[in-house]
Amino acid sequence: MNLLNPAVLVLKVSLLVSVLVSMLCPAFMVNAEESEPDAGAGSEPTVLDELLPATGPLKTKQQPVDMIADDEFKPALRDNLPQMVEKIQIERLASDSPYVMLPHRPNYVLPLSYQSRPSDREQNRVLQHYTGDPDAEREAGNDHLEAVFQLSIKYRLSEGLLGKFSSVDVAYTNRSFWQAYNSDISRPFRETNHEPELIFSWQPQNKWVDYFSLAINHQSNGQTSSMSRSWNRVIAQVASVSSTGIYSTRIWWRLPEESKADPFDPADNDNPDIDDYMGNGEFTYIYVMGNHNISTMLRNNLNPDKNRGAIEVGWTFPLNRKIKGFVQYFNGYGESLIDYNRYQERIGVGIKLSDWF
């Protein structure tokens, strides 16, 4: 059994944070001409001032980049979420470099995360199947306390299919649940969910919708036998900006698979009833209060007879110019694929390295 002392554990977590920070700081990787800050501005130049011209083409070593001026954005977005405007402009410049991976979903590390109902059900199920002993169980199981982190990146394949405000991206999101403090079972990664997707996004210039995307999405936990969980979806998303934040709705359709489900047959459906727990969509509202954000995600299967759903609430607050504090609470079904059909409650505390904006 591989027992790690606290110093080694701290070193591993520090290395993980360092890798995430280095991948998510395009300001250090973008290869563009330096521009002089406005001497009359009277304030320190921002990241945007250092990287971007006001408008028009910027010549890089690769090709001209046609930037988006502030007045080209919809007034609702420009006036209510200037930080989102800045992010879109920086992404447009950074994506021209072949050396840059852009943040996709929020990237965060929760070193302290407490789950109310740790389970060894699936591990014991595999043990019982291969030993032939219906009462076989692991000597030691999963703890309540663990670390959770999410790494999410994207690479821009194309821009301008429907004007300046459209793009095609390939993205990957990794969410891991690490029993980092459980030395009795050698501190394993209890569950890791992999989510690659191909996304077309567009910001239509109309009154009601500020963002639209259509994605082909695969999600899997990368396991075999009865531990395997996966599904494929087509996901449509719309979002609108208000004076207080962002409203977002995602609706998905699961691509058909085999209807039968033998957990030990790799050709069968791993989780035929996942829609009964995850539903066919979710609603998210991000409330913006200066430098603080409160996000609320609601999900429900809309079945009055066997109603199941989930709520996730996150509070993001500034720690310094780049890193934010992050508190996350989850209650319901579907937090991870291995536990999609188990009720779970969790609260975690940590840092967020990149956000939606």
Image (cartoon, helix red, strand yellow):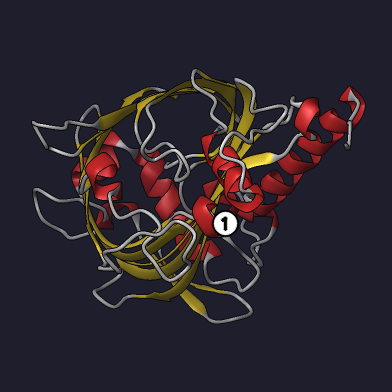
Q: Position of residue 355 (x, y in %)?
A: 48, 39
Q: Residue at x 80, y 27 (%)?
A: 183
Amino acid type of disc 1? Gln
Decide if residue 289 is in sight here.
yes
Decide if residue 201 is in sight here.
no
Q: Quadrant of residue 288?
A: top left
Q: Residue at x 35, y 59 (%)?
A: 261
In-image side of 84 versus 35 (left or right): left
Q: Residue at x 55, y 32 (%)?
A: 42
Q: Position of residue 319 (x, y in %)?
A: 61, 22
In-image side of 330 versus 31 (left or right): left
Relative to 112, is 13 above or below?
below
In the orientation shown, which residue stands out farthest toward the front?
A: 133
In-image side of 18 versus 141 (left or right): right
All told, the count of numbered labels is 1
Q: Nearer the viewer, residue 62 or 55?
A: 62
Residue under numbered circle 1: 223
Q: Nearer the viewer, residue 203 or 90?
A: 203
Relative to 354, is 285 above or below?
above
Q: Quadrant of residue 284?
A: top left
Query: Which quarter of the rendered picture does the C terminus lie within?
Result: top left
Q: Position of residue 190 (x, y in %)?
A: 62, 39
Q: Residue at x 36, y 53 (%)?
A: 271
Check disc 1: other Cα within 10 Å, few if <14, some if 14-19, many if 20+: some
Secondary structure under the numbered disc 1 in the rendered image:
loop
In-image side of 220 versus 285 (left or right): right
Query: Which quarter of the rendered picture does the N terminus lie within?
Result: top right
